[in-house]
């Protein structure tokens, strides 16, 4: 009977999706999955058999969409058949959605690459065992949903404990992430050296940095610190320190791209990462590490990394009303502060902040993010979204002249203001929160 419910759920999913498209009511990234799980609560447990080789999950506070997207792109360039929640719907309903709309009784995939929300990973593993888990980082994020970092870490640890055969691929530079590798099969990636070759990114952040204690209770020290808690850490009181990475990165960061050398098993591999900033280089290093672990050839990975284009809002480039526009999601203090380092201060800037459930109701993170980086903005800074006025107040305290700040709560109107200049050489930067980003992605200009 359960198997029959699974097939009924597949048929129901297709019917609902067609209805959504006909009525033009939704993008269908989660609703179909929600209805599928209502029809067959253990739907995902049947989906695992439709993956012939490996199932790979990616989680973490920042970068999981880019890391999983790049990894899926690498596998597809290797002629593998991949199922992937490419639109970033990473809760249980979103994962069910992508399977419900892509599998058929005779259609199987070589790999699954599944981005998972940290809090939902343990629920996913109740139904869907994974062969690999890539953990990008752990930063403070949405206190109303996740609580403190220890709570987020416990979500991921509980998921790992459910899957005894899971192989971990962990960010060695994050002291919270490396804890997951204790007494487990784990490979580590991290940077040995980072060189900034552009003044745009080689700036100090004034955002608050949390102090992390070792498990013995003493504060961690650093030989190198790249940003937030990421770096080469050690404890003076005990033997705890950053593990030696299996995949060692040597990075040169330019204004629009990075050159990355990866050393693995005494072999050197060179890559061009056509994404902005150090944080995206971390995402690339994680994806490369997982691809090499799965035996993908260097030439394939190199071409895939160079040709990868991020999905909407993750360093997305668009032309809006004739202006070159860069869209970058911001959603928590560390991620926002790193993005703010990369902003072209000669561009018109739109910051669109909502406080819907998916964004997090608590917007205190705006005050912990380094908006002081925009102090020397040459043109307009337009605040928009539900919390446009709160964002404008934050910019005032960041030292941005009030005559440069425009408050326009309607997001489309804010973008129209930023792109109204007849000088098409004038660039635009849009920094939206998550639901503002979704709204922008549906807009046509």
Image (spheres, rainbow, N blue to C red):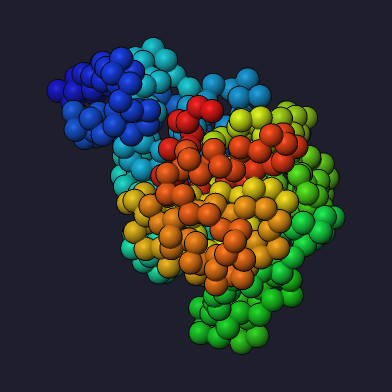
Which residue occupies 65% across, 43% down? 428
Residue 105 vertical position relative to residue 153 in the rendered view, above or below: above
269 with respect to 152 (left or right): right
Residue 444 screen position, x and y as percent = 50, 27
Closer-to-camera residue (162/144): 144
Residue drawn at (36%, 36%), measured in percent from left and top? Answer: 94
Q: Would you say 95 lies left or right of 351 here?
A: left
Residue 361, image x and y in percent?
34, 59
The front one of 199 and 418 is 418
Residue located farthest toward the left when viewing the structure as drawn: 1
| 93, 168: nearer the viewer | 93
Q: Is residue 5 above or below residue 226?
A: above
Quadrant for residue 389, please give it: bottom left
- Is the C terminus in the top left, top right, bottom left or bottom right quadrant? top right
At x 62% / y 52%, what residue is drawn? 380
Residue 140 appears in the figure = no
């Amino acid at each position: 009977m359960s198997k029959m419910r699974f097939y009924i759920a597949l048929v129901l999913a297709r019917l609902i999706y067609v209805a959504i498209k006909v009525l033009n009511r939704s993008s269908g990234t989660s609703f179909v999955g929600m209805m599928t799980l209502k029809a067959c609560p253990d739907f995902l447990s049947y989906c695992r058999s439709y993956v012939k080789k490996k199932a790979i999950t990616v989680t973490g506070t920042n970068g999981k969409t880019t890391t999983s997207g790049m990894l899926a792109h690498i596998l597809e360039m290797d002629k593998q058949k991949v199922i992937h929640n490419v639109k970033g719907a990473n809760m249980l309903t979103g994962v069910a959605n992508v399977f419900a709309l892509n599998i058929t009784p005779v259609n199987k995939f070589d790999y699954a690459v599944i981005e998972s929300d940290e809090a939902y990973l343990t629920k996913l593993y109740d139904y869907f065992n994974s062969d690999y888990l890539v953990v990008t980082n752990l930063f403070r994020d949405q206190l109303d949903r996740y609580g403190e970092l220890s709570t987020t870490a416990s979500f991921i640890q509980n998921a790992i404990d459910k899957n005894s055969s899971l192989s971990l691929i962990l960010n060695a530079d994050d002291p919270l992430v490396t804890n997951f590798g204790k007494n487990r099969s784990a490979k580590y990636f991290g940077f040995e050296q980072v060189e900034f070759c552009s003044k745009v990114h080689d700036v100090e952040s004034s955002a608050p940095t949390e102090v992390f204690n070792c498990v013995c209770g003493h504060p961690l020290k650093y030989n190198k610190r790249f940003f937030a808690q990421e770096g080469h850490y050690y404890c003076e009181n005990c033997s705890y320190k950053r593990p030696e990475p299996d995949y060692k990165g040597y990075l040169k960061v330019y204004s629009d791209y990075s050159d990355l050398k990866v050393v693995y098993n005494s072999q050197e591999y060179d890559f061009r990462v056509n994404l902005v900033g150090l944080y995206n280089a971390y995402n690339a290093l994680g994806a490369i590490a997982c691809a090499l672990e799965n035996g993908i050839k260097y030439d394939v990975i190199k071409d895939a990394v160079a040709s990868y284009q991020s999905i909407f809002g993750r360093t997305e480039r668009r032309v809006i009303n004739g202006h070159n526009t860069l869209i970058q999601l911001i959603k928590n203090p560390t991620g926002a502060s790193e993005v703010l380092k990369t902003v072209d201060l000669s561009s018109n800037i739109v910051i669109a902040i909502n406080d819907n459930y998916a964004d997090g109701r608590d917007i205190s993170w705006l005050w912990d993010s380094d908006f002081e980086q925009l102090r020397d903005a040459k043109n307009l800074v337009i605040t928009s979204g539900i919390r446009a006025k709160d964002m404008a107040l934050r910019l005032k305290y960041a030292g941005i002249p009030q005559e440069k700040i425009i408050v326009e709560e309607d997001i489309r109107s804010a973008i129209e203001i930023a792109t109204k200049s007849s000088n098409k050489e004038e660039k635009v930067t849009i920094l939206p929160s998550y639901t503002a980003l979704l709204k922008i992605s549906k807009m046509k200009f």
